[in-house]
Amino acid sequence: MRMTPRDETVDRHRIRDKKLVWVIRQNGLPVLMVLCATLLMSEELQSGGRMSEQIRSKSDDQRLVSDARVQHLSYVLEETGETIPYALFVPKAYDAEIQMPLVVSLHGLSRTHDWLMGYEGFLDYADEMNFVVVTPLGYTRQGWYGSWLRGVDGRNLEVEGAYSQQDVMNVVGLVQKAYAIDPERMYLWGHSMGGAGTYHLAMEYPDMWAAVAVVAPAVPQVRSTADLGLIQHIPMLVLQGTEDRLVHSTRIWVEAMRRLNMNVQYDEINGADHSLFISKNKKNVHRLLGFFDGKTR
């Protein structure tokens, strides 16, 4: 009679237990401890589990925005079995019979997945312009959306970065499936670390976006200004403060855009910092969303 998978497992465990008893009798407790550790590792590998250090922490699932207009949602990342949060805003005028534009928004380093929903005026203007808005986590709060090879603390981002990029695209797919989204009016933007992610994901999926914007963007480690040729056809908005140290790298990237004759609008705001000039400034938030309004692929 053919053995079932369960029978095979039971038989394998029975043989293992007999070996274990023999080892105990012959070698005593020290060898037993070593053998148990080896068996546990073997079981872990056979079950497909990971023995590597856990990447995510409880802080990755935190939320800070309590606005009733924001939906706090989650899904299970198939590759790891982990539940990943994201935040969604749907305008009051949403009609399932009418396709609406989508704004994909990438947060800065160490921020929560819903952080951008709290920028002053952001949801008001999104509602006014009938934007569906989603803010993915990017797997962790400092995963860099695949745009960096190493974190600011020097840790390797090979695994975390790949999941971070994948999480964004998974969430976009979930929103497209659940809501009537116009594929010709999908926009991508990010602040700081999210700016680096925006550069990278725009270049990775250049036929997906009707327009992109970066705000005080970090420079993506996996990209160079030569890669701007991949998104030469996409309208770009760049918002940057002069009091932010990133202004120097932003100027270099904008100059490269201009050499390519890209459709770029660069607003360098005199005296502006790295964060507050967008998170606490309704005028600049309106400038950002207004740039997207009406643009199509």
Image (cartoon, grey):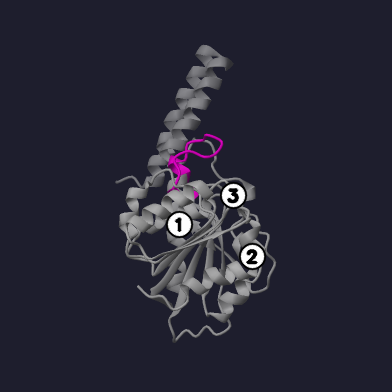
Q: Is residue 145 visible?
A: no
- Residue at 49% over, 55% down: 195
Is 153 covered by the magenta stretch?
A: yes
Q: Which residue is mark 3?
A: 244
Q: Which residue is mark 2?
A: 119
Asked whether residue 289 is in view, the answer is yes
Q: Is residue 8 magenta?
A: no
Q: Position of residue 161 (x, y in %)?
A: 46, 46
Residue beneath disc 1: 198
Q: Main secondary structure of the magenta part?
A: loop
Point out the image quarter for the C terminus. bottom left
**Structural distance between the alpha carbons of marks 3 and 2:** 19 Å
At label 2, the amino acid type is: Tyr
| Residue with the most extreme front position | 270
Helix, strand or loop status at disc 3 = loop
> Which stretch did the figure color magenta?
144-160
**Placement of 91 over or under 108, stated as above or below:** below
